[in-house]
Image: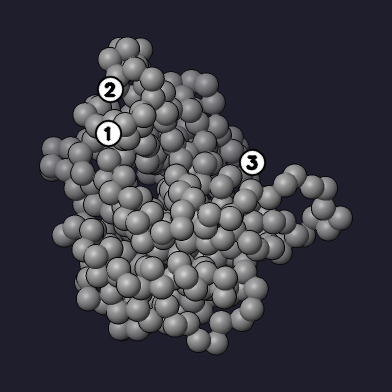
Amino acid sequence: MRRRDIFPLALLPCAGFGSQEQDAEVRFAAGAREVRLDVLVANGKGPVEGLRAEDFLVLDEGRPVKLTYGGVGEQPLSVLLLLDVSGSMKQYLEQIGRRARQLVELLEANDKAAVMVFTKDTDYFRPFTGDKDRLVYALDQAMRPVDMPAGTSINAALVDAAQAFADLPAQPAYNTIVILTDNRGLNYQIPDSLVLEKLYGADTVLHSVVTKKAERPRPTASANPDFSFANVFALSEATGGEVLRTDRADEAFAQLLRNARRRYLLSFVAPPANAGAEKQFRRLEVKLSPAAAKRVGKVTIRARQGYYL
């Protein structure tokens, strides 16, 4: 990954949220793994608001866990815009460029954003910042990338994006990647399982804005296991993100940023890893409590499907 700092600026952590009393509730033993869940609860009318931490039931390998934190108000956003700048995306990039100022103005005082572009390689245009003028300039420059190689390596770009979050200090915020792509790409030696491990490790949700003609790859038996077709649909679903198929990328970006503020941020302390095991995957399921389910009716819940110890 290349890194282009349009303005010299150190990486800035997102500001915290909640009262001092709330923050004091989150305490972990040395070496404990905090698992954060960014959860969207929606019905036919859109995101459901007004739920509390006790309205959620989180199952870790089928067993309920005790939530150590439940942020249910508007929390800061830490969002990375990941833009596919291959030739086929010109129309959609121009839409983002024309409305760069309006999109950036959706960010609030404690929010931070970053800008990455990719083709076969990834270029880091703007590290996380709350400076809206710098973000507008970065988006404007991203519309005219130079010296980017041909090809589209989506999974490699997602690994780089996840690493950008992993490099930030731990923070109670919505860690969000919004990718713009047509989902046309071939991955080399970076399977979806590795991407999910990186996204889960950074407690990051992937939202995808895809073109109208974007399709999920058809299941095929590959003659070479080193190669795989891009599938942002499955990756977004596995992290609890949304996929918006659109011919107006600017409107889709704006909708995802608005929805991000209406998601619930939950956390719990993971159990200790088994001795001698290098890596363990644990499945998660998020439900509403029986009382909450009865109160709000039928809903769809989007949340990450697991995490690694």
* Residue under numbered circle 2: 54
For badge 2, the amino acid type reads Glu
The relative height of residue 263 versus residue 152 in the rendered view (above or below) is above
Image position of 50 (left or right of 55): left
Using the rendered view, name the quadrant where residue 167 is placed.
Answer: bottom left
Whether pointer 2 and pointer 1 mark residues with C-beta atoms closer than 8 Å, the reply is yes
The residue under the point 26% across, 45% down is 261
Residue at 52% x, 37% y: name it.
306
Q: Regarding mark 1 in the picture, which secondary structure is present there?
A: strand
Report the residue marked by disc 1.
70
* Position of 61 relative to 79 (above/below): above
Residue that protrudes farthest toward the bottom in the picture? 147
**Is the residue 162 above or below the residue 238 in the image?**
below
Q: Nearer the viewer, residue 120 or 24?
A: 120
Packing grade of label 1 (10 A; few <14, some 14-19, many >=20) is many
Q: Position of residue 75 (x, y in %)?
A: 23, 46
| Residue 70 rendering spot, x and y as whole percentages | 27, 34
**Front-lying residue, 234 or 182:** 182
Towards the viewer: 107 or 308: 107
Q: Give how far apart the Cα atoms at labels 2 and 1 are.
A: 8 Å
Horizontal arrangement in the rendering, residue 26 relative to residue 178 (left or right): left
Q: Is residue 107 left or right of residue 43?
A: left
| Residue bearing the label numbered 3 | 276
**N-terminal-most mark, 3 or 1:** 1
Evaluate if marks 2 and 3 touch, with contact meaning CB atoms under 8 Å apart: no
Badge 2 marks a residue whose secondary structure is helix
Residue 270 falls in image quadrant:
top left
Q: Position of residue 79 (x, y in %)?
A: 35, 58
Marks 3/1: CA–CA distance: 32 Å
Disc 2 to disc 3, how far (Cα)?
35 Å
Residue 267 seen from this side? no
Amino acid type at image mark 3: Gly
